[in-house]
Structure formats: C-alpha cells, structure tokens
Amino acid sequence: MGIRPVDKATVNAYDKGMESLQSPGAVIPDGPVKDKAGTMTGRAVGRRPAQPPQPRGLRRGSLTPALIVKESLRLLDSDTGFSLPKLGRALGADPTAVYRHFPSKDDLVLAIADALIEEATAGVSLQDCWVDTLAESARRLRRTYLAHPAAAALSACRTTQRPAEMRIVNVIIGAVRAAGFEGAEAAVVYRSVGDFALFWSGGEASFWALDEKAQQTDRAAWTRAYLVASEDEFPHIFAVRDELAKVADDDIFETILSLVLAGLIRRAPRPCDCGSHE
C-alpha cells in the first residue's frame, strides 16, 4: 500500500521466497500456533499437516489466475515447500502454464500480496468512528499475515496497484480525511498509518517464516543474554531483566498501535464522532 524501506530480515525473507519459486526442494515453515482461546502465542512455530493432493489434469482453459494464487498460498502455508514445479503439480498443469497468466514470477508475487490484502480487508468499510476504522484495518492485516507468514514475508513490502489494495487505500484515506486531514497532510498521514501496518505485520510475519531453530534462538535471547546482563554495564536492562521474556507479541502490537492512534487523535483537526477516544 506504499513504497517503504524494509529491514534486513524482510529483505532476506523476500530473497528466500523468490529463490523458492525456482527451487524444487525449498521448505517454508508455517505460521504461529495459537492457544485454546485462539490467541497468537510466543511458542515456536507449528506446522500444518501436508494437504491432500489436488486433482490432476485440469480441463483446457480451466487454469485461472485466481486458482494459481490460491494454490500458491496453499503451498506456501504447507510444510511441503513452494516452487514452480510443485505449483504445476498441484495445479495438474505444466509449470510453464503459469506464465500464460503471470508474465513473470514478480507478477505472481504481487498477485499473492493482493490476495492477502483481500483476505484481510474483505468487508472493511468506513465506520462512524475514524479511529475504529484505522484500528480494525491494522489488526485484520496483522491477523492475515500471521496466518500466512511465508507469503506475507515474501510480499508485504510490495505495492500491488491491484483491486484489493486500491479499495483499502481508499477506505484508510477516507478515515484520515474524516479526522480532518486534507491535501498533502492527508497523504503523509495515510502513508504513515498504512506503512506502519504493513511494515510491522510484515516484519512479524518474517520472524514466523524463519525455521524453528532460528525462532527458538531469538526467543531464548531474553532468558539468556538479557537475563544475565551485568548490572554495572547495563543497569537499565538489569532493572527489567525478569520482565523482558514475559512480553507477548500481541501486547507489543497493541501497545504500538495505541501509541500511533493516540498521536493521531491529538493531532487530528476533527475528533472522532464517538467521543470515546478523546
């Protein structure tokens, strides 16, 4: 939903994903596990069981862009790995048939990116309260990206210029204008809000797209290096060392989202109509 700088983890995840389009043996891990309440947890990533094989031998003319994107997402979500040969087998078609619908691998990546945005934002519209509109769109994007971490890591930093992206951009700009921002200021505020949601959720998805060993190493840092930090050398880390490992991903996201929205509320020329966010 806008061109933005990306961090090293996201770049690496994108490069890995592009390589997987060509590699027949690449395996991309699945997204985060949930507890019984459905909340994303900080445990190591789980894997979905392999999906049953799809029907072979599509009728001539039955291969569509939508079907290609759907199967691409299914492969990216699975533990079987993603490559053009595997995509061709899943579709029951020669892998080169994909190029009749997507001139390049990058076009397929953009279509996958727009499919994720469509899944995240289907039914989203301007609410009476512009704050609620911005909060809902950000939370829904994050939920979708965490459900499809490999695909999100591959595509979150892209600007698709496709229907789903255009629709949600229009909704978010509508919310920004409802807050009283206009002209150049409205454009900057929109880009800031939209890029925050994409960058944050895409970065989080990139972590979940790492292999399990890398995830466990990163998680363990809070109970190893930081827990035993020297009070003399790192007094501020030492003061909260026992709490650092307890911080949940959901709490991090909701805190930064609340800070973003609080800043907008203070700066907005027009308060929200509901009056509950003053």
Image: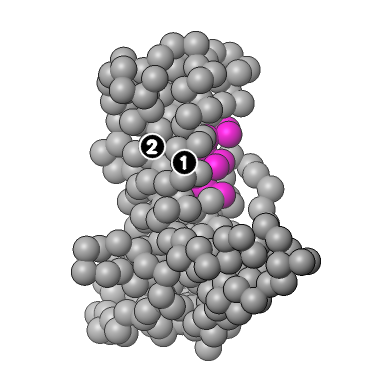
Q: Are marks 1 and 2 in contact (CB under 8 Å)?
A: yes
- Single out the mark in the foreground, 1 or 2: 1
Q: Is residue 192 magenta?
A: yes
> Which tag, 1 or 2, sits closer to the chain's start?
2
**Image location (x, y in percent) of residue 143:** 36, 55
Element assignment for label 2: helix
* Residue 68: quadrant of the picture: bottom left
Q: Is residue 266 left or right of residue 140?
A: right
> Considering only vertical position in the picture, is 79 above or below 252?
below
Residue flagged by tag 2: what amino acid is it? Ala
In depth, the one of 9 and 60 nearer the eye is 9
- The answer to whether residue 76 shows anywhere in this view is yes
Q: Which residues are magenta?
A: 191-199
Q: Residue at x 31, y 17 (%)?
A: 275
Main secondary structure found in the magenta portion? helix
Q: Which residue extends farthest bottom?
A: 25
Q: Is residue 11 left or right of residue 187?
A: right
Checking the image for residue 135, the label placed there is 2
Residue nearest the viewer, comparing 76 with 136: 136
Depicted 177 relative to depicted 41: above or below: above
Considering every residue shown, the one lying at the far left of the view is 36
The residue that mark 1 highlights is 257
231 sits to left or right of 38: right
